[in-house]
Amino acid sequence: MTAPEIVLTADLVRDLLRDQHPDLAGLPIREVPGGWGNQMWRLGDELAVRVQRNDPTPQLQLKERRWLPVLAPRLPLPVPVPVRSGEPSERFPKHWTVMTWVPGEPLDHGTISRGEHAADTLADFLRALHAEAPADAPVSADRGAHPRDCTDGFEKFLEAVALDDLAADVRAVWDDAAAAGAWEEPPGWVHGDLHPANVVVAEGTLSGIVDFGDLFAGDPAWDLAAAWVVLPEGTAARFFERYARADEPAIRRARGLAAMKSLFLILMGQNGDRGLPGGKPHWGPAGRAALDRVLKGL
């Protein structure tokens, strides 16, 4: 629910379009399963409506509206590009955005069978994304810090998932990341939230990247963690070879961050098993598989 009296439905989305973008209101509307901060509705074959739901502020959508049109032309994979803006109204008091649809299936509902191709594709995408960001690029309030400054969060995740048999090994990976040198180059663009639900796959490989609400300028290690969180076993080394811009400290930071992201996925899976709001049962196995890959290293 977006507010005590308002439930998101296809009829409401169509009414919003009639009010603000009537030329699009006749297109078929289909709900896209998933989503927490925002709810997605497919609009025809080429568009989607992204509706603010549980996000407490519109800043994530406004950030995507501002920066995705700038970044998309230089990226080698499709990303959602805002094409129309929906503003708060008496009918619905939050923001919504019409965006291009990225074809494919989210990885948390799909698979990567062409691992080497996926590793090369992700490396090429991140090389293009991680260009130096302009001075007015957004910064993150909760992401982008050196792992040593995120140890409290890591410990909370580790304690919450209660992986007693692996705790010492996971903490060793984190401690190594916390001891690694810091990012000393100018801040680059960082997606900030690469995990299986935000990676789109088709024909066994990566076909798109979605959800740039956490986009910020900072340490690319936060994205390089995807070498373990997203890619299948045995492909991380190929990814870093292709990416070719990560020194040893960056890889160590990325591996630690991948451990923390894996714990988060496991926790979300456990929350789903308990029936808690926002929990996703199918994320648990994905998180455990990612953690196994992290522990194996390169």
Image (tube, rainbow, N blue to C red):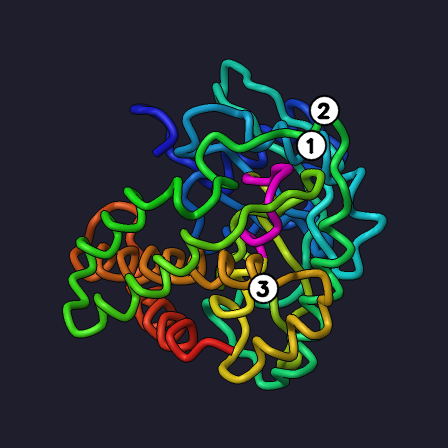
Residue type indicated by callout 3: Glu
Residue 215 shown in magenta: yes
Residue type indicated by callout 1: Arg
The label shown at residue 248 is 3
Above or below 17: residue 155: below
The label shown at residue 136 is 2
* Residue bearing mark 1: 65
In what element is the residue under mark 3?
Answer: helix
Marked residue nearer the N-terminal end (3 or 2): 2
Q: Kindly identify the residue that appears in the image at 58 percent across and 85 percent down.
A: 113
**Residues tagged 3 and 2 counted as in contact (Cβ below 8 A):** no
Please rate how many residues cluster around mark 2, counting C-alpha atoms within 10 Å: few if below 14, some from 14 to 19, many from 20: few
Using residue 122 as the reference point, say whether residue 75 is left or right of it: right
Q: Kindly identify the residue that appears in the image at 61 percent across and 21 percent down.
A: 87
Please tell me whether mark 1 or mark 2 is closer to you in this view.
2
* Boundaries of the magenta span: 214-223
Q: In whole angstroms, how far apart are the C-alphas of marks 3 and 2? A: 29 Å
Position of residue 205 measured from the top left corner of the image (x, y, whole percent): 64, 77
Q: Kindly identify the residue that appears in the image at 43 percent across and 32 percent down.
A: 55
In what element is the residue under mark 2?
Answer: loop
